[in-house]
């Protein structure tokens, strides 16, 4: 009888230990993915090899209540030759069923060409030799690039904001040292500090739009270009309703691929937001996007050849007006 009791006690102890171990593993935070994500932010990217050229590809989709409002694909080649920053790029987008295709070629600070591939029209942007060229030089200057690793204070703030979401991160390590890092967050998982921050950002955005300056008159002239014909009748405010009440992030997903040096090679993300507009109508907005970098230090931007083409002149002030109107 004593022997039987002894076996029961041993069995109970083993069972208790097994249960304890399983419980401990079940409640032990798995932060490997989050740690990998932070490693990217903490990496000193400025200490690596200089990037003189690269190709950047991206796509972007916006859906409202299940209907695709905007779909865009773009590719850009950037490089330096003869001491000048050269850029070439293609943009293809469809806005409410209307498709447009455009290309850009930039050589240095004073040579910019725009091509309306939809209508086979060519433009040279002029008046870039004063304040506009100066703005371009300032933006492209190395002193303006503030790429630095995350410091301890920023890391502590990030840990606080993320909270228990650390378990929502995952990482897959590849044989070549690269990693695929992903985070998947549902509405119920978003911590209070992050929700408060998003509410504050949304309020600030509404205030900014309310006080935005009026667009320049040149925007009306720019809209007369064939590229914009057919687009001017689209009511973007109706197609992209401003959510003002009960705004909530329903789902967030981010995935990025980094190399062995924690340099980001590509990323893709999904964001789903719900809320009511000023009329109290509930909407659901879905945004998807992806991008990747390739051809590092092995990219040559395409050059524009105006020979044999009818090239019209386009004043830079008109483009400034368009961008200002877009921001407002």
Image: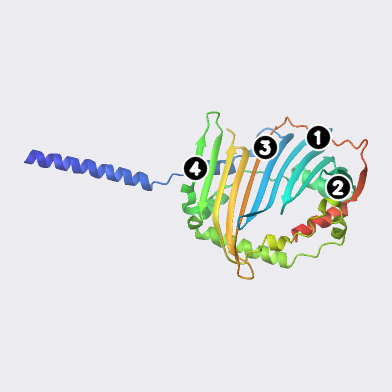
- Marks 2 and 3, the one that precedes in the sequence: 2
Circles 1 and 2: CB atoms closer than 8 Å: no
Question: In the rendering, at what x and y percent does residue 44 appear?
Answer: 62, 39
Please rate how many residues cluster around mark 1, counting C-alpha atoms within 10 Å: few if below 14, some from 14 to 19, many from 20: some
Is 10 left or right of 269, judged from the image as shown? left
Check disc 2 and report the residue beneath it.
133
- Marks 1 and 2, the one that precedes in the sequence: 2
- Marks 4 and 3, the one that precedes in the sequence: 4
Q: Which mark is residue 98?
A: none
Question: In the rendering, at what x and y percent does residue 58 appear?
Answer: 68, 42
Check disc 1 and report the residue beneath it.
302
Residue at image coords 78%, 56%: 231
Is 15 left or right of 275, judged from the image as shown? left
Please rate how many residues cluster around mark 4, counting C-alpha atoms within 10 Å: few if below 14, some from 14 to 19, many from 20: many
| Quadrant housing the C terminus | bottom right
Check disc 4 and report the residue beneath it.
170
Label 2, label 3: how many angstroms apart (C-alpha)?
A: 27 Å
Front-most of 228 and 195?
Answer: 228
Residue at image coords 23%, 43%: 15
Front-most of 169 and 141?
Answer: 169
Residue at image coords 73%, 40%: 75
Mark 3 secondary-structure assignment? strand
Marks 1, 3: nearer the viewer: 1
Check disc 3 and report the residue beneath it.
293
């Amino acid at each position: 009888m004593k022997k039987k009791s002894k076996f029961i006690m041993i069995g109970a102890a083993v069972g208790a230990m097994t249960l304890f171990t399983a419980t401990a593993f079940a409640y032990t935070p798995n932060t490997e993915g989050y740690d990998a994500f932070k490693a990217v932010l903490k990496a000193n990217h400025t200490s690596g090899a200089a990037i003189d050229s690269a190709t950047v590809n991206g796509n972007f989709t916006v859906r409202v209540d299940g209907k695709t409002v905007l779909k865009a694909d773009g590719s850009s080649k950037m490089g330096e030759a003869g001491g000048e920053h050269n850029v070439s790029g293609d943009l293809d987008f469809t806005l409410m069923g209307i498709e447009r295709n455009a290309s850009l070629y930039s050589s240095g600070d004073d040579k910019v060409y725009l091509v309306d591939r939809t209508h086979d029209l060519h433009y040279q942007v002029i008046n870039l030799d004063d304040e506009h060229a100066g703005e371009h030089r300032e933006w492209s200057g190395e002193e303006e690039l503030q790429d630095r690793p995350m410091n301890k204070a920023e890391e502590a703030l990030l840990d606080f904001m993320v909270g228990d979401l650390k378990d929502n991160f995952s990482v897959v390590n590849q044989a070549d040292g690269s990693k695929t890092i992903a985070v998947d967050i549902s509405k119920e998982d978003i911590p209070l500090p992050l929700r408060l921050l998003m509410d504050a950002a949304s309020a600030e955005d509404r205030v900014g739009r309310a006080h935005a300056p009026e667009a320049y008159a040149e925007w009306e002239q720019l809209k007369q270009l064939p590229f914009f014909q057919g687009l001017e009748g689209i009511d973007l405010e109706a197609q992209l309703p401003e959510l003002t009440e009960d705004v909530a992030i329903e789902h967030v997903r981010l995935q990025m691929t980094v190399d062995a040096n924690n340099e980001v090679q590509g990323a893709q993300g999904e964001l789903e937001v719900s809320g009511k507009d000023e009329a109290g109508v509930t909407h659901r907005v879905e945004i998807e996007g992806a991008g990747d970098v390739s051809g590092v230090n092995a990219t040559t931007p395409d050059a524009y050849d105006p020979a044999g083409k009818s090239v019209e002149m386009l004043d830079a002030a008109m483009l400034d007006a368009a961008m200002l109107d877009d921001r407002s």
